[in-house]
Amino acid sequence: MKLQTIVPIEKQSKNAIDYNARVLLLGSCFSENIGTNFEYYKFNSTQNPFGILFHPKAIENLICNSLHQKKYTEKELFFKEERWHSFEVHSSLSNTNKDALLTLLNNSVLETKKQVEKASHIIITLGTAWVYKYTETNSIVANCHKVPQKEFTKQLLSVAEITESLQTILTEINNVNKNCTVVFTVSPVRHLKDGFVENTRSKAHLIAAIHQVLQNNKTMYFPSYEIMMDELRDYRFYQEDMLHPNKTAIRYIWEKFVSVFFTENCQKTMKEVALIQKGMAHKPFHLDSESHQKFLKKLDQKKEELKQKHPNLSFF
């Protein structure tokens, strides 16, 4: 008896991820969930240098600014509730010190440019097609920073607008890194503050646009949203807000992602890394006991053996 309808996903044998990969993750909060797993398994990965970005225009803006080495200045910042902010980045970067924020933004520009140029894989998670346009400048913002909503106009990006934005992203990446594989996915988080129908329209626009730009084996789509909506169509896979996937759901989607994009040898190494991670997290009753010291010595040996095979691995 089958109790699920499974979303069919083809195994990607070309451009697969292994421990030589350099991965850059950009986009919505779900990219952070996936990024945490990349960190746990000790991949060479970077996530959201400019913080969480929900819509394609914000991601396009960040990539273009970084690759063209934009220099952020004071005129692009504003002060609200004792902190300096930029409409182009997430509030996690906001700072009480203006110069500190400018330094952080300009360092992030340099870091993102370096990461895009060297990345073997860039994973972009799109969260919503709804955007807010700041009336004073008539420009789309990445984050409203709790500025009153009356100062913005809200609009739904069309499929054509999103397609154009995604194509710009791919062109910019290709101009500096022709060997990079770009994986698009749509966040399984439902943005019901926009409304039930509005959320569905938003996700549909994102999915339709992504499929407009899937032209070769260097650009791929992973159905995170579809897996959540179909294979995990039960509220036991959600957090208490009934909007965000819980740890079980995130783990399920991550394992699907691994099975599709990671080499078999890589998956074996991941199991070895997980054993070491569990060993490092172990809390003994007696730190100085002989048995614990033997355990630590054996753990160090495992780390060293793994590092001999994969010099890029670091457990510190």
Image (cartoon, helix red, strand yellow):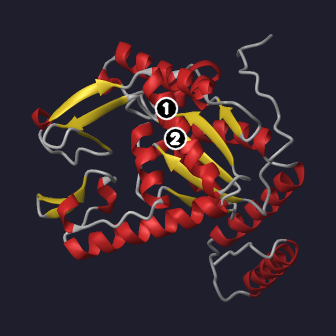
- Residue 45 is at least partly visible in this image: no
**Three-letter code for the amino acid on which mark 2 is drawn:** Thr
Nearer to me, 120 or 253? 120
Question: Percent x, y for residue 240?
Answer: 40, 33
Q: Dot 1, crowdedness within 10 Å: few (<14), some or many (≥20)?
A: some
Examine the rendered structure and indicate whether residue 225 appears above or below residue 247. Answer: above
Residue 233: quarter of image: top right
**Three-letter code for the amino acid on which mark 1 is drawn:** Glu
Examine the rendered structure and indicate whether residue 88 appears above or below residue 4. Answer: below
Q: Dot 2, crowdedness within 10 Å: few (<14), some or many (≥20)?
A: some
Question: Percent x, y for residue 75?
Answer: 18, 62
Residue 247: quarter of image: top right
Residue under pointer 1:
164
Residue under pointer 2:
168
Asked whether the beta carbons under mark 2 and mark 1 sit within 8 Å of each other, the answer is yes
Q: How many marks?
A: 2
| Residue at image location 81% in from the left, 29% down from the top | 10
Element type at mark 1: helix
